[in-house]
Image: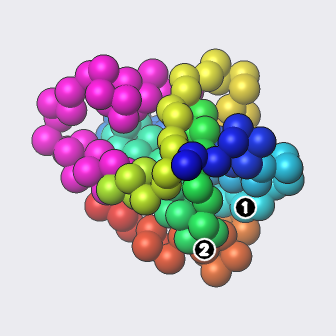
Amino acid sequence: MLPSSESTWVLYTDGGSRGNPGPAGSGFVLFDSSGARVCAAGHFIGEATNNRAEYDGLVRGLSSAVSRGCRSLEVRMDSELIVRQMTGRYRVKNEGLKEPFAHAKALAARVDRVRFMHVPREENTEADKLANEAMDARGPVGDRDDVCGDAEAQGTLF
């Protein structure tokens, strides 16, 4: 039996690059089913495309949710491309995105119920802010990896 919607956690993710490719960062914010913020982190990932950075944030956020035993998750992203790829509406044609896509799909499969939603940028400001802060800092920002529990995603992912 799937968990009720009352036990659904919410994950906001984002990624960006300054240039495409260029210096890139990702961010995510995870909320538990009560609406309490569980973890928020940003990571500098070096030189990457915007879409690769989007996947980095998604993988790190999914890893954090999985490590905390999340069973029902709503993922909110402002990248319509990534949402449509994760839902199967679009195929992943870019060779550089196939590996992070597969990683994200494998993590999502470890959650009983996952729903991917496209949201406007205005609704994803905290994850966006963390991605930008990580690019500025050229390193991790927000909660530490040991607090976020994304051990599978530490360091450069891809």
Mark 2 lies on a secondary structure that is: loop
The answer to whether 33 appears left or right of 115 in the picture is right
**Rendered residue at 52%/34% (across/down):** 115
Looking at the picture, tell me which residue is in the foreground, 81 or 90.
90
Residue 26: percent from the left, percent from the top?
A: 53, 50
Residue 88 among those drawn in magenta: yes
What residue would you read off at disc 2? 149
Which amino acid does the dot numbered 2 rest on? Gly
What residue would you read off at disc 1? 39
Q: Quadrant of residue 132?
A: top right
Q: Quadrant of residue 5?
A: top right
Which amino acid does the dot numbered 1 rest on? Cys
Residue 45 among those drawn in magenta: no
Pick whichever of labels 2 and 1 is earlier in the sequence: 1
**Rendered residue at 20%/45% (across/down):** 98
- Residue 134, numbered circle: none
Residue 38, compared with residue 116, is above or below; it is below
Start-end of magenta stretch: 78-105
Mark 1 lies on a secondary structure that is: strand
Looking at the picture, tell me which residue is in the foreground, 8 or 101.
8
Residue 127: percent from the left, percent from the top?
A: 66, 43
Of all residues, the one furthest to the front in this rendering is 1
Residue 38: percent from the left, percent from the top?
A: 77, 61
Dots 2, 1 in contact, CB < 8 A: yes
Looking at the picture, tell me which residue is in the foreground, 149 or 1.
1
**From mark 2 to mark 1, how far is it between C-alphas?**
9 Å
